Image: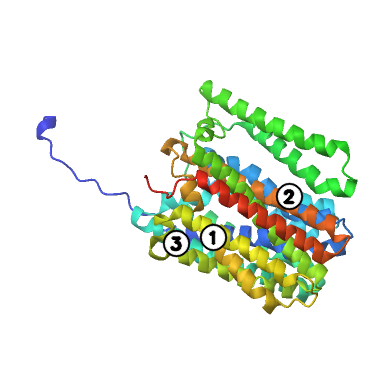
Amino acid sequence: MSVATAPVVATADPPAYRWRWVALFAILTAEVMDLLDALVTTIAGPTIRADLGAPESTIQWLAAGYTLAMAVGLVTGGRLGDLFGRRRMFLVGTAGFVAASLLCALAQGEGTLVTARVLQGLFGAVLLPQGLGLIKEMFPPHQVGAAFGLFGPVMGLSAVGGPILAGWLVSADLFGLGWRMIFLINLPIGLLGLVLGARFMPRSRDASAPRLDVAGVGLVSAAMFLLVYPIVQGRELGWPAWTFASMVVALVVFGVFGWWEARRQRRGFDPLVVPTLFRKRAFTGGLVAGTAFFAGLLGFSLVLTLYLQLGLGYSPLKTGLTGVPQAVGVVVGFGLSAAGGLARRHGRLVLQAGVAVMALAALGLLATIHGTSTVTPWRLAPVLAAFGIGMGLAMAPFFDIILAGVEPRESGSASGALNAAQQFAGALGVAALGTLFFNRAASGITGAIESVLYAVAGLLVLTCALSFLLPRTARPE
């Protein structure tokens, strides 16, 4: 039969994976673990430090060590799934996260605990990126939106419930374990994810996956560490000359990383981060704006907790409950952005409005606490709720706008770079604003939190100014 007269046979989409919803539940358990562990040490930090007799910098390292390791790992986490199989790397990441959580709970000193937190961040960076690929692989196109739609409620509940759960576990002192229970709670969650993942996730592997840029990973990891370490430790050590030298060297290593990536691409190898991305004004501006934004956001969260517990004498549980208005505000802000496609149609304007609301709320918080020591959760609730609403408004369109001008072939690299930059900015913010707080706390806790709030407002104003480099919307103009 000739080609011209051959009958046309309609090809149907391949059948959807049978156990996709159960496998999705396993993926969501990983998200819950990550969200909980990004929040719990912020609440429990002062209690952990007091119990271990650790220096003040330990509180910063409990948060910064996790996010810094996450930033480093996210650069390659997705590619590991392409190379060795998403199911396999999900299971490896989950098992490692559970083991690191157990090590956190058993730690007898700050060195072991911070090391275990770093391991948590690294294994979290291995397991989290696998979810996106698995969902696209398991679900037919018309169900992908519904699958991703479940992330919103889960993340919202975790953001609201996580600090409360952490505060309750520390205050309740179950079985005499105190703060260690905030890590042991990961064991049943993680083991459930392991069992479901091993039984119900499909096996897959991308034969065309690019090779890992090991040298690039080493350079960017060294640069991040050389910048964050002296910021955290410098105050306790009296700011010796090497701390400033380390920060200068970090900038040089970042430059070497950029040169290496360009060289690797010229020689026909796959770079860790596609160098052409940095020629796009929207991407580069968004990266800098995002660094200022998330540094202020994560640093603010840590310092607020320190103020509530060390300055006002709140218990961990009361501290967790005090943060509920902010978490609820985030959910409301996201809802407002989504209403009528507001974020999609007016992306940059919505982002700028959200950042402005956050800056005003930071100044409102400053006015609330200025000159008084009788600050109640009810007095803080309105400004914290406003701060949360601003967060939701700003974050909803943020990544879509930055990625608007990115070519399809660059999207994977751009997304990985943005996620890594977000985590690194969090570590940087915790280091810098935490150091500012402890430096000023010697002359009064109220003065320390006020200094930090001025810095947060400044970072948000900078974010707003840099956002003018972004396109007006994520749609082509």
Residue 221: percent from the left, percent from the top?
A: 69, 38
Q: Name the N-terminal-most of marks 2 and 3.
A: 2
Amino acid beneath label 2: Gly
User: Gap between marks 1 and 2, in whole Å?
Assistant: 29 Å
What colouring does the structure picture have?
Answer: rainbow
Quadrant of residue 376 within the rendered picture:
bottom right
Return the mark for residue 65: 2
Residue 151: percent from the left, percent from the top?
A: 50, 61
Q: Nearer the viewer, residue 105 or 346?
A: 346
Which of the image's four quarters has the C terminus?
A: top left
Return the mark for residue 149: 3
Which of the image's four quarters has the N terminus?
A: top left
Q: Name the N-terminal-most of marks 1 and 2.
A: 2
Mark 1 residue element: helix
Instruction: Give above or below for 375 relative to 13.
Output: below
Q: Name the N-terminal-most of marks 3 and 1.
A: 3
Q: Are marks 3 and 1 in contact (CB under 8 Å)?
A: no
Amino acid beneath label 3: Gly
Residue 178 in view, yes or no? no
User: In the image, is 12 to the left or to the right of 98?
Assistant: left
Residue 172: percent from the left, percent from the top?
A: 76, 76
Return the mark for residue 354: 1
Residue 207: percent from the left, percent from the top?
A: 46, 35
